[in-house]
Image: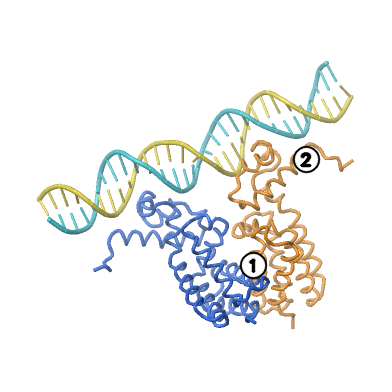
Chain colours: A orange, B blue, C yellow, D cyan
Amino acid sequence: MAATSSVRDRTRLEIVQQAMTLFQEKGYNATSLQDIATAAGCSKATVLYHFSDKTGVLVAVLEPSHAALSKLVAEASALPAAEAQELAIGRFVELAVEFRGLISVLQDLFGSLGEIPEFGGLVTEGLRLTELLAGGTGNQLELDVAKFAINGLLGECRHPGERTDAELHELCDTALRRLLRPPA
Amino acid sequence: MAATSSVRDRTRLEIVQQAMTLFQEKGYNATSLQDIATAAGCSKATVLYHFSDKTGVLVAVLEPSHAALSKLVAEASALPAAEAQELAIGRFVELAVEFRGLISVLQDLFGSLGEIPEFGGLVTEGLRLTELLAGGTGNQLELDVAKFAINGLLGECRHPGERTDAELHELCDTALRRLLRPPA
DNA sequence: TTGAAAACTGGCCGACCGGTCAGGATGATG
DNA sequence: CATCATCCTGACCGGTCGGCCAGTTTTCAA
């Protein structure tokens, strides 16, 4: 009974999907509410009827990937350092490939992400992921290299097409394993 | 006789310097012509008197770093692959540190850089740098890893303060040398 | 000193932005 | 069929943006 797709749900879904596409193509800031509304086949006012404001649309677009990241960090955190690093590398690469289109959206907002309360957790989990990738050592250089790795990976996923998922996966896996030293 | 700083040159310089600071602090898109004018102590119309449009200010701000990149690419291109790679790594790291503040500006514009004619050369030279860093091999994976490296380095230079130039230099050098295999 | 060229500015314009609101259309329920 | 909540929209608002232009001020050489 809960699975019936109400009119509400259908419209919301259409808005979120079209917004996701536009955010990936033009970036969050360069996409207007009118753009989203036109693509979704409704009026700008309708978008704002379903979402509190433009940020609300962004939160909905990013929700699945955010949840996946949270899950990864939680699982890896429960493991010893060495296994946690191994798990983090493998699953993070998978995640990056799966959500490759959304990554440019994130990069577009890196400076202002912290200012949106809904994304406080995302920032925290990003930092936690850095530690996991660094292999649990407190070594500052290794931590910074891990951040370097994340940046490289995020940047690499930006340019669309041209690369299959398999190719992207191999590239990210290779680069991460060259960069990240196993923990001492 | 050519070195006398005319009124024109003094105002232009002030505008460019203030614009550079603002672009670094808030990003290009988030900085308005009025912001630049206020910081430079003149009116918005004056900014547009000295520069054709907002893009013109950006071109002037980026000109020194663009020139430095061109020089690096030109010098390295004249060398055999192995020496070219070595030179490219060392000098590119130095460049990144020297212009670290401007890098966030570049990243802010990565999607739209190609649309500005003045920056066509910059994009071309970025691609050429990729080849040089990859060690001249046609190997696609190594080329992609080189791009990965550039992205990581650019991303790492974004966050201001906190890291001294020396620390940033060490980090970038370490990461690049781990990532980039010497040519076969 | 003077007059033309260079430098500068206030005020204005059209476009677009995110967001609000009163009211019309639609669909489920009795 | 009537009713009422849900869904949706056109019109509008205050604000910011990049850019333009007519006209004033400053500079500087003759």
Q: Quadrant of residue B174?
A: bottom right
Q: Which mark is residue A151?
A: 1
The chain identifier of the residue carrying mark 1 reads A
What's under tag 1, amino acid-wise? Asn
Which element carries disc 1, helix, strand or loop? helix
Quarter of the rendering occupied by the C terminus of chain A: bottom right
Q: Which mark is residue A10?
A: 2
Q: Is residue A77 above or below residue B22?
A: below
Q: Earlier in the sequence, mark 2 or mark 1?
A: 2
* Depth check, front residue: A103 or B33: A103
- Image position of B43 (left or right of A127): left
Quarter of the rendering occupied by the N terminus of chain A: top right
Q: Residues within 10 Å of mark 1 (few under 14, many from 20)?
A: many
Q: Quadrant of residue D8?
A: top right
Residue B12, percent from left and from top: 35, 59
Residue B68, percent from left and from top: 46, 71
